[in-house]
């Protein structure tokens, strides 16, 4: 089980808990920023030791988020999923404890009211479904699954033209549509009294991030508008996996400008532990300060 890696943040009456499927995944820093170098990463001393290794590799998590409000129990993104066939071996034929980790928090899969997918990449939709025999069925049978309308239409267009790996659409999205559980929403949709969406298109056609506000406390879950804290210092740099690199850059720049020194808790969907913290500073001195990192570093 990955219980030891789960972290919970309290935002007024809302709790956010990271359900970590792959912890402390390490790769070259240019996995995120194509032209970045280990030397650049190491020069940002605030990235060490939590977000880069001593030799300049990036550290990151693959995780989804259980969000509990006074009236709803939600999943924001659902990670990779077990028993999948994917382009990269690291995501293929996983056997993780994702559902057991939820159960350890007293949450059964039947308790989830809403699933919100920030975008439709395979590592954010996997546990939308689970295998039963030879078929894929909704993991959360009592939930409404919210997909961005622009996002879904964008993937439908890519599917029609071919050339993209669509296996995740077949095993994690199509069964939700067929079960009648999907709802297409706009990029500023209000999910509950405490949660709403903000657009951050570019990584994918209709990517969104999730804002949270309760009793005067504020948070945001980034989705993939950024993958690594290094991007707080250089949001203008092209990101390798952004489908529209110019739009992705513009979304990151706006996000960093809006949330730096704002007091809003930023929870990075792929940030290594500590995943939650604050963006502080300006320009090249802008940095992500993880909660607890100040003490541990």
Image (tube, rainbow, N blue to C red):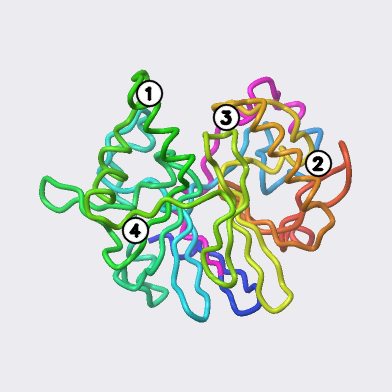
Secondary structure found at label 4 = loop
Q: Which of marks 2 and 1 is nearer the N terminus?
A: 2
Q: Is residue 13 above or below residue 241?
A: below
Range drawn in magenta: 16-41
- How many other residues sit within 10 Å of disc 4, few (<14), some (14-19) or many (≥20)? some
Residue 198's x, y, as percent?
Answer: 62, 51
The residue carrying mark 2 is: 45
Q: Which one is in front, 143 or 39?
A: 143
Q: Which one is in front, 232 or 295?
A: 232
Q: In this view, does 226 lie to the left or right of 98?
A: right
Taking the spot 59% from the left edge, 38% from the top edge, the residue there is 201
The residue carrying mark 3 is: 242
Q: Which of marks 3 and 2 is nearer the N terminus?
A: 2
Taking the spot 42% from the left edge, 42% from the top edge, the residue there is 123
Disc 4 + disc 3, Cβ < 8 Å: no
Taking the spot 20% from the left edge, 48% from the top edge, the residue there is 136
Distance from the alpha carbon under mark 4 to that under mark 3? 29 Å
Secondary structure found at label 3 = loop
The residue carrying mark 4 is: 97
Q: Earlier in the sequence, mark 1 or mark 3?
A: 1
Residue 244's x, y, as percent?
Answer: 59, 26
- How many other residues sit within 10 Å of disc 1, few (<14), some (14-19) or many (≥20)? few
Disc 2 + disc 1, Cβ < 8 Å: no
Distance from the alpha carbon under mark 3 to that under mark 2? 26 Å
Distance from the alpha carbon under mark 2 to that under mark 4? 34 Å
Taking the spot 73% from the left edge, 27% from the top edge, the residue there is 237
The residue carrying mark 1 is: 164
Q: Which of marks 4 and 3 is nearer the N terminus?
A: 4
Closer to the observer: label 3 or label 2?
A: 3
Q: Which one is in front, 145 or 25?
A: 145
Secondary structure found at label 2 = helix
Distance from the alpha carbon under mark 2 to that under mark 1? 38 Å
């Amino acid at each position: 089980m990955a219980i030891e890696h789960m972290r919970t943040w309290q935002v007024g009456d809302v709790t956010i808990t990271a359900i970590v499927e792959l912890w402390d995944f390490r790769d070259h820093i240019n996995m995120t920023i194509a032209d970045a170098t280990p030397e650049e990463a190491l020069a940002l001393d605030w990235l060490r030791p939590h977000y880069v290794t001593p030799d300049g590799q990036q550290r990151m998590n693959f995780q989804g988020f259980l969000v509990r409000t006074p009236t709803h129990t939600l999943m924001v993104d659902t990670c990779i999923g077990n028993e999948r066939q994917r382009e990269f071996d690291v995501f293929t034929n996983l056997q993780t404890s994702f559902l057991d980790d939820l159960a350890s928090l007293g949450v059964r899969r039947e308790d989830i009211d809403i699933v919100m997918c920030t975008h439709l990449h395979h590592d954010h939709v996997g546990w939308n479904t689970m295998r039963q025999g030879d078929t894929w069925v909704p993991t959360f049978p009592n939930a409404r699954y919210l997909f961005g309308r622009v996002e879904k239409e964008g993937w439908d267009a890519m599917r029609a033209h071919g050339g993209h790996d669509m296996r995740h659409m077949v095993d994690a999205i199509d069964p939700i549509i067929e079960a009648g559980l999907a709802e297409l929403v706009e990029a500023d949709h209000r999910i509950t009294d405490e949660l709403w969406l903000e657009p951050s298109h570019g990584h994918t056609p209709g990517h969104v991030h999730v804002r949270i506000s309760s009793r005067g406390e504020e948070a945001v879950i980034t989705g993939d508008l950024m993958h690594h804290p290094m991007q707080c210092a250089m949001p203008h740099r092209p990101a390798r996996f952004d489908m529209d690199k110019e739009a992705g850059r513009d979304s990151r720049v706006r996000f960093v400008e809006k949330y730096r020194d704002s007091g809003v808790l930023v929870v990075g969907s792929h940030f290594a532990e500590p995943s939650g913290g604050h963006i502080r500073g300006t320009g090249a001195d802008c940095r992500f300060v993880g909660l607890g990192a100040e003490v541990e570093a």
